[in-house]
Image (cartoon, rainbow, N blue to C red):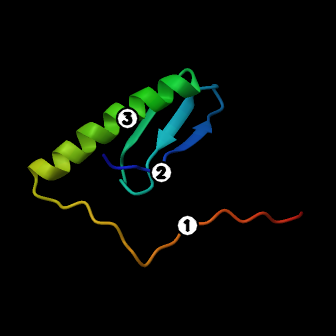
């Protein structure tokens, strides 16, 4: 099992758009946040399967660190 960071945004039509920063082009949507997450899970599985079929390895860049930083504005 592998974990992927998923970014969810609500668009102007109230649809939830889900993207996976580590898998460029892997995007899905749903009318609810739960539906978007269910759809992106399937999109990730298909995306990774296509990469494997094409012989493209999944690589993690160990030199990148993500953190959340609170800033007062």
Check the image and report above or below for 61 versus 52.
below
- For the question of whether residue 30 can be seen, the reply is no
Which residue was labeled with disc 3? 41
**Label 3: few (<14), some (14–19) or many (≥20) C-alpha neighbours in 10 Å:** some
x and y percent of residue 56 in the render? 16, 59
Q: Secondary structure at mark 2?
A: loop
Residue that mark 2 sits on:
5
Q: Residue at x 26, y 44 (%)?
A: 47
Q: Quadrant of residue 68?
A: bottom right
The answer to which of 13 and 50 lies nearer the viewer is 50
Name the residue: 57% across, 22% down: 32
- Residue that sits furthest to the bottom in the current view: 63
The residue carrying pointer 1 sits among few (fewer than 14), some (14 to 19) or many (20 or more) residues within 10 Å by Cα, namely few
Position above or below: 4 against 13: below
Judged from the image, the secondary structure of the residue bearing numbered disc 1 is loop
- The residue at which mark 1 appears reads as 66
13 relative to 73 in the view: left or right: left
């Amino acid at each position: 099992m592998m974990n992927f960071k998923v970014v969810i945004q609500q668009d102007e039509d109230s649809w939830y758009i889900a993207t996976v920063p580590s898998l460029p082009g892997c995007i899905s949507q749903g009318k609810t946040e739960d539906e978007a997450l269910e759809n992106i899970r399937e999109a990730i599985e298909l995306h990774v399967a296509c990469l494997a079929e094409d012989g493209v390895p999944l690589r993690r860049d160990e030199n990148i660190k993500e953190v959340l930083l609170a800033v007062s504005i």
